[in-house]
Amino acid sequence: MLNEDTAPASSVRSRRFSSFLPDISAFPRPIRGRLAPSPTGYLHLGNAWSFLLCWLAVRSVHGSLILRMEDIDIQRSRPEYAEAIEEDLRWLGLDWDEGPDIGGPCGPYAQKERLAIYEAAIAALEAGGRVYPCFCTRKELRSLAGAPHIDDIGAPYPGTCRNLSNKERENFLRAGHRASLRLRCPDPPVNFVDLCMGPQCFRLEDCGGDFALRRSDGVVAYQLAAAVDDALMGVTQVVRGRDILYSTPRQICLQDLLGCASPTYAHIPLVLDEEGERLAKRHKSLSLRELRLAGAAPERIVALLGHLAGVWPMGRPARPRELISFFSFDKLPREDVVISRADIQMLCA
Ligand code: GLU
């Protein structure tokens, strides 16, 4: 039999999930955070806000930071965006200690290179009787890949395929239907204390019910990839927008079922435009690229975001490292923040 530690890379598919669990002695520093961009477009001010706060939360406690490219959805991800994201983060003044460009002990740091690990996790969940095939079509259900947002939870999965008999499953397969894989969610509620939003208690049923682990086209779902990566990369603190709050119970549930520790979470307020709309990749003019072309200096962007976060006085340009000693979760606003047209004009003045 092959020794798992010395087995060639091609045998990685047959490795058991437990063999991927991290040796926590490899993480001497107390806090490990991660920047986890999806390379499906250029970074905008909303991303810059989340990443700056994540970076400050880690650097203010002398922790270490991972850059992880969430390029699992190969149809929507583009290598040129991944490159641009790294460049824009550096331009802003953010750095990381491990990542696709510099490597590190928990690599690879691009999700498309971690498929064997996700398959091992799915196999472990399957072995625990937690996975079932679902034959509902994409048309019948809303798309399940990508990072979900509150509005995207939509109607809970009604459990249509949860209790199909083997015969029914065979019939679907024989008729050429392709199955996605879903997690049979446990009933007990998931509790956690959010560093921004306080104690949280969710029933998975209220977070969309049995969620997909792998789509019918074979793409591994965001929930699984993120939960597995946070666990295996030894992430201890996740800072991200509050639009992802409803994903957290699902990710904690997966980590629990896989026998891994969960990080602590901080779901921060979102950045809105003047119309009250969440900034998104469609706000092209607010991409860091466009702002840079329009003459905005990164120090002004950082100062604006730092001011909105309550950790920097209005006006004085700053590099991220100048904000480190002022950062505290307590100072963050409770409500979403608005970036006005006047703010943008000031950035480019
Ligand atoms: N890749 C996700 C996004 O860009 C991040 C999700 C997360 O932080 O867990 O929205």
Image: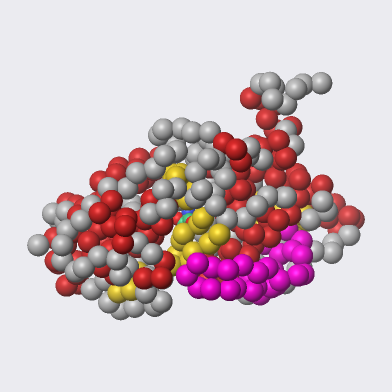
As rendered, which of 2 and 42 lies closer to the eye? Answer: 2
| Residue sitting at x 49%, y 33% | 104
Structure colour scheme = secondary structure
| Residue sitting at x 41%, y 76% | 334
Q: Is residue 329 left or right of residue 227?
A: left
In the rendered image, residue 345, in percent from the top left (x then y), is placed at 14, 67
| Residue sitting at x 38%, y 51% | 59
- Res 121 quadrant in image: top right
- Res 184 quadrant in image: bottom right
- Residue 73 painted magenta: no
Task: Count all numbered tags in the image, as a single digit.
Answer: 0
Q: Is residue 157 left or right of residue 310?
A: right
In the rendered image, residue 31, in percent from the top left (x then y), is placed at 49, 50
In the rendered image, which quarter contains the N terminus? top right
Q: Residue furthest left?
A: 349
Query: Can residue 109 be seen?
Result: yes
Establish if 297 lies above or below 306.
Answer: above
- Residue 200 painted magenta: yes
Looking at the rendering, the stretch of residues picked out in magenta corresponds to 182-211
In the rendered image, which quarter contains the C terminus? bottom left
Q: Is residue 226 left or right of residue 189?
A: left
In the rendered image, residue 320, in percent from the top left (x then y), is placed at 28, 53
As rendered, which of 222 and 33 lies closer to the eye? Answer: 33
| Residue sitting at x 54%, y 52% | 236
In the rendered image, residue 140, in percent from the top left (x then y), is placed at 65, 67
Query: Can residue 180 be seen?
Result: no
As rendered, which of 116 and 24 lies closer to the eye? Answer: 24
